[in-house]
Image (tube, rainbow, N blue to C red):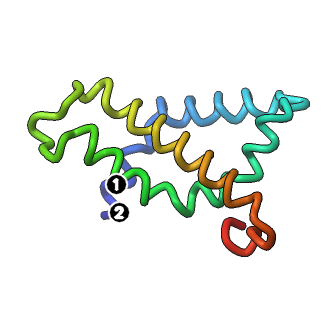
Amino acid sequence: MMEWSWEFCTPNVLLAIFGSFLLFSCIQKAPRWINSLAKLTFGMYLMHIFFLTFIAEWIINGDVATPILPVWLAIPIIGLLTFLCCAVTTKLISQIPGSKYIIG
């Protein structure tokens, strides 16, 4: 298990992480919609596995060997649909009084 995690400790990954950090640390003021979405991220994290399971099952049509879409297209679509479902659901839950105890 530990050997697998070290596979990602390469110069390319290090440079990508460093570049991402520099990119996001230069942002002075984020747009309002990003700030409102950022407040929902913990709830999205907590529920993403529920949506991911069903969406991935639907996209691959229950058979990993013959998915509906090619893998290079299926992975981003699964990620995007999971993100959107989690964002909408968390936003709806956040409208309920006392929801901070549910979604953080």
Q: Which residue ends up furthest to the left in the rendered image?
A: 65
Residue denoted by label 2: 2
Quarter the C terminus occupies: bottom right
Which element type, helix, strand or loop, lies under badge 2?
helix
Mark 1 closeness class: few <14, some 14–19, many ≥20 residues within 10 Å: few
Residue 64, image x, y percentages: 15, 42
Total marks in image: 2
Residue 36, image x, y percentages: 80, 44
Mark 2 closeness class: few <14, some 14–19, many ≥20 residues within 10 Å: few
The numbered mark at residue 53 is 1
Residue positioned 18% across, 41% down in the render: 61
* Between discs 1 and 2, the one toward the N terminus: 2
The numbered mark at residue 17 is none
Amino acid type at circle 1 is Thr
User: Does 63 sit above or below residue 23?
Assistant: below
Q: Which residue ends up furthest to the right in the rendered image?
A: 29
User: Does 44 sit above or below residue 75?
Assistant: below
Amino acid type at circle 2 is Met
Residue positioned 80% across, 69% down in the render: 97
**Left or right of 1 in this view: 87:** right
Which element type, helix, strand or loop, lies under badge 1?
helix
Residue 22, image x, y percentages: 73, 30
Residue sitting nearer the eye, 81 or 70: 81
